[in-house]
Amino acid sequence: MMTEAYPLSWPQGFKRTAPTKRRTAPFGKTGSRGYKQSLTTADGLQRLIEQLELMGAINYVISTNVELRNDGLPRSGRRAPDDPGVAIYFQFCGKAHCLPCDRWNSVADNLAAVAKHIEALRGMDRWGVGDLEMAFAGFKTLPPPGGGVPVDEAAQHSNWWDVLGVDPDATPDKVRDAFRRLAKKHHPDTGGDPDIMAELNTAYQEGMKR
C-alpha cells in the first residue's frame, strides 16, 4: 500500500495532539514593510524541502490534509483543513523514517516545525557532536512509502499469515475477520501494544493485496 500524500496518513504508534492543545507557532516571516506575517503552505514546503535535500533524504512523501498540486505536493492557498497535522516519510541511510507533527494550528507551521527539527539534527554534522545517522538511530523505523517492512527489520518479521493466525491461502473475508478479532485485543485505544498493532496492520495489508 502506497503512503498517501493526501489525505493525511498519520503513522501508527504516534500520539496525536488534542485540538484544544494546539498553539500558534513562533515561526512566521518578515513582510516587505517589516511586519511579521504568518507562513503560507508554500513557505512551509520550501523550508522543509530545503532541509530534506540538505540532509540527503530520498523518496520523501509529504502527507497532509491539503489538496495536491500536479507535482504531488500540497497546494497553497486552499482552505485550512480541520486537521493541520503533517507526516513526512523518507528514506535515510537505507532506513525508512517518518517525522510527524500536529502541535501547531496550521499545516504551514507544522511543515516548518519539521524543517526546524531536521535543521537542528543537521547541526550535529556542523559542530562535530555526533552525526545524522546516529541521531536517526533513535527513531523508530517505518515501512517505506512504497510499503513493506523496514530494511533492518525484514528478517525479524513473520509471514503475514502467521501474524494473523490464518492459512496462506485464506480468503479476504477470513483475513479481515482475523484482523478485526486481533485488533480488538491489541489496539492502543483499548490498552494494547502499539508495536503489535502496527505489525497487525502490515500483515493485514499484505494479506489483502494478493
Image (cartoon, helix red, strand yellow):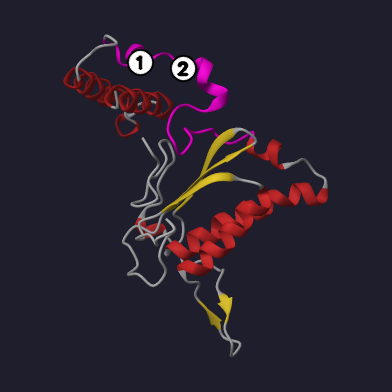
Which residue appears at 55% of the width and 73% of the height?
28
**The residue stretch that appears in magenta:** 137-166
Examine the residues drawn in magenta and state their main secondary structure.
loop
Decide which of 57, 130 is in the foreground and name it. Answer: 57
Q: In the picture provided, is 189 more to the left or to the right than 33?
A: left
Mark 2 crowd level (few <14, some 14–19, many ≥20, 10 Å Cα): few
Residue farthest to the front? 70
Q: Could you tell me how many numbered marks the image carries?
A: 2
Residue 44 position in % (x across, y down): 52, 64
Quadrant assignment for the C terminus: top left
* Front residue (pair 18, 179): 179
Q: Residue furthest top?
A: 167
Dot 2 lies on which element?
loop
Badge number at residue 157? 2
Q: Report the front residue among 21 and 113.
A: 113
Q: Amino acid at mark 2?
A: His
Q: CA distance from mark 1 to mark 2?
A: 9 Å
Q: Are marks 1 and 2 in contact (CB under 8 Å)?
A: yes
Question: Looking at numbered disc 1 in the image, what kind of residue is underneath it?
Answer: Val
The spot of residue 79 in percent (x, y) is 32, 70
Q: Who's the residue at 32% across and 28% down the image?
A: 205
Q: Which residue is tagged 1?
A: 163
Residue 194 position, x and y percent, is 40, 29
Residue furthest to the left in view is 173
Query: Would residue 155 be counted in the magenta stretch?
Result: yes
Is residue 116 left or right of 4 when viewed as pictured? right
Secondary structure of the residue carrying tag 1 is helix
- What x and y, as percent, mark residue 133? 69, 37
**Image quarter (top left, top right, bottom left or bottom right) of the N terminus:** top left
